[in-house]
Amino acid sequence: MNGSPRPLPEFTTWPTFPFEGNLRLRELAEPETFEPPREGEDGQPCPSCEAPDGAYIWVNERWRVKSLDRPSGLPMVLLLETRSHLDLGDLTNLLAAELGVMTVRLEKAIRSLDGVARVHVNRWGDGRAHLHLWFFARPYGQTQLRGSFLPMWNDILPPVDELRWQEDRALVAAWLAEFGGEAIAEPPRIQWLAPSRLEERDGGADPGGYGSASALDDGSGPPASGSGGETGDPTAPVPPASTGEGSAVPSRPADSTGTGGREEPVGGRA
């Protein structure tokens, strides 16, 4: 090229491309004589085989689903793995058929989460020999994240709220467990405040309010009469828990199999 800079590809001008400014192409290295071994082949240890079921959010006898170890820039990023040490081309006819079922089922589970518009499914396989498919949830309305650069945006955007992330992991696990297997992920525990902590939070104000010992004795009884519209009557019926759209209680997936909602059990980007 006589030392002149090579023109940038057209996709660098797309609004979905994460970078702007002065960019230049990296020089392409010469081909290697041999492909380097991936994790899990040619005597290399396999992290997927060594990981216990507790490292996943849902498992059954042939498949496991895991999340990243911490929140990232997208609402949810999950991986679907075979339990056995197999790559894509090694799957039996049964596992190949189940891979299609599991891919559709997991995509639906992630797309059912609040604020998710689309789910991107990817498979690379250059870093690990153990089959794993990536599922990336694109936030609703974030059209700039559309397309093939979504994994880049996941590394660029600030992490999502951790409590919301834990709740969504549990919802996906519960959805999958409706069809069999075991949900490992659980929703986060509610951090109840003791009366003394409420006083600290409210600065000790309002001696007759919920932050005082006169309103709350040990945190286990109902609110006093006249506060917040509650009756204070311990015999009054307790309203049922909400199961609306924002609830952490998962709804049962729609039955499309004609079997009462339950099918036969089927079971670092690299």
Image (tube, rainbow, N blue to C red):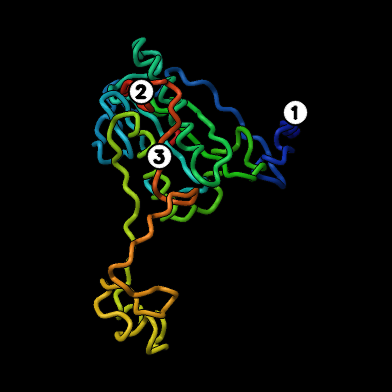
Q: Please say if 47 is above or below 211.
A: above
Say the numbered circle drawn on residue 263: 2
> 254 or 197, which is in the foreground?
254
Residue highlighted by disc 3 = 172
Which quadrant would residue 84 be assigned to in this image? top left
Distance, label 3 to label 2, CA atoms, is 17 Å
Work out whether residue 129 or residue 142 is closer to the camera in this orientation and state it: 142
**Callout 3 crowding tier (Cα within 10 Å): few <14, some 14–19, many ≥20:** many
In-front residue for pair 176/158? 176
**Label 1 with label 3: CB-CB less than 8 Å:** no
The residue labelled by disc 1 is: 2
Of the pair 34 and 225, the residue shown nearer to us: 225
The residue carrying pointer 2 sits among few (fewer than 14), some (14 to 19) or many (20 or more) residues within 10 Å by Cα, namely some
Which residue is rendered at x = 45% and y = 34% of the image? 269
Task: Give above or below for 45 relative to 22.
Answer: above
N-terminal label among 1 and 2 = 1
Quarter the C terminus occupies: top left
Q: Position of residue 131 (x, y in %)?
A: 38, 24
Q: Check disc 2 and report its element: helix, strand or loop.
A: loop
**What x and y, as percent, mark residue 73?**
52, 48
Disc 3 marks which amino acid? Val
Residue 41 appears in the picture as rendered: no
| Front tag of 3 and 2 | 2
Sequence order check: which comes first, mark 1 or mark 3? 1
Cα distance in 3D space between marks 1 and 3: 55 Å
Quarter of the image with the N terminus is top right
Q: What is the distance, in whole Å, between disc 1 and disc 2 at their CAs?
A: 63 Å
Amino acid carrying mark 2 in the image: Glu
Q: Position of residue 15 (x, y in %)?
A: 72, 41
Decide: is 234 above or below 168: below
Relative to 7, 131 lies left or right: left
Q: Amino acid at mark 1?
A: Asn
